[in-house]
Amino acid sequence: MSWLEVGSLLGFLAGSCLYLLLSTGLDEAQLTSWGWRVPFLISAPLGVIGFIIRNKIEDTPEYRTLEANDTVPRTPVRELLRHHKRQLLQAAGLMAAMHVPFYAVLTYLVTYETDHLGHSAGSAALLSTVISLLGLVLVPVFGLLSDRVGRKPVFVGATAALLVLATPAFLLMRTGLAGTWVAGLLLGAILAAILGTYAVWSAEIFPTRTRQSGLSIAYNLTAALFAGTVPYLMTVLISATGSTLVPGPYLMVFAAGGLIAALTLKETAGSALLRPEDVSDAAPERN
């Protein structure tokens, strides 16, 4: 499942490259008048392609087994909330620990560099592009590593590293452009380790009967609450405190949450996705 995150990074990489081209090739007046429309025009066909692909995806073998055994739940959300609240909270912890550094490193860092470090828009976009390229290489590597040594060691190591290094990274950025690049690449590598493990681990902690509902609720709820709000909240907190180090402690909070969630979870690498309770006569809310 780490390849899913490669797709996300490819999207951010395309956006970073496009921003780099527009910011260096157009002046501010051109960007304001018509340049800002270019990304929307380019992305429109991708939405159509994504819709077509989504409609052609087949159900997993595990889910087809549920259908064959007539054990597909009629109300999976109710079953999830009744029997798997703990797993839902754990998955939310993993995903929040992914969403916040993802948007902090790949989106907000560009604004942070230009507004608080005095770097040019082109330089900031270039670093974002390189971080995305680094992720394209490292995410599958960490995904493979989690298959070999387990989800827990990789994710725990990544969130522990983020907890310890987030604030020092933003301190390092104050030293100049070279320090910003070192810190940005360090945060990008930590993010890659999280991206390589969180999705598959989140999927494996739910039984097949409620896997889709559990993943959807945990992912979208944490995305709505914590992902898109990262740039806004960091801007507000920096303005309120007067400290440009705020992003460090902010990342630490979610790293700690993800670390706690990970430590309470069992290792799932190599475990069967279809469990006996998924197809047994005692399965709750059987059709």
Image (tube, helix red, strand yellow):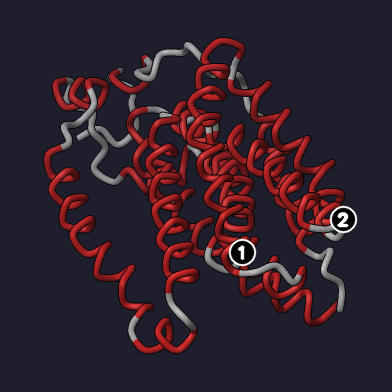
Q: Which residue occupies the foreground of this view, 236 or 83?
A: 236
Residue that carries the numbered disc 1 in the rendered image: 110
From this view, report whether residue 244 is shown above or below residue 189.
Answer: below
Report x, y in % for residue 155: 65, 30
In the figure, residue 34 lies in which quadrant?
bottom left
Residue 36 horizontal/vertical position (percent): 38, 78
Q: Amino acid at mark 1?
A: Val
Horizontal side of residue 240 vs 276, given as left or right: right
Tag 2–tag 1 contact (CB < 8 Å): no
Residue 232 visible in the snapshot:
yes
Circle 1 sits in a helix, a strand or a loop, which is it?
helix
Q: Amino acid at mark 2?
A: Leu
Query: Residue 171 got which mark?
Result: 2
Badge 1: few (under 14), some or many (20 or more) residues near its Cα, within 10 Å? many
Give whichever of discs 2 and 1 has the lower sequence position. Answer: 1
3D distance between C-alphas at marks 2 and 1: 16 Å
For the point 34% across and 18% down, the residue is 274
Q: Does residue 263 appear in this view?
A: no
Q: Position of residue 131 (x, y in %)?
A: 58, 45
The reply, left or right, for residue 214 in relation to residue 58 is right
Q: Residue at x 16, y 57 (%)?
A: 48
Asked which secondary structure carries label 2, the reply is helix
Give 217 or 148, whichever is nearer the viewer. 148
Q: Residue at x 39, y 51 (%)?
A: 11
Q: Quadrant of the C terminus?
A: top left
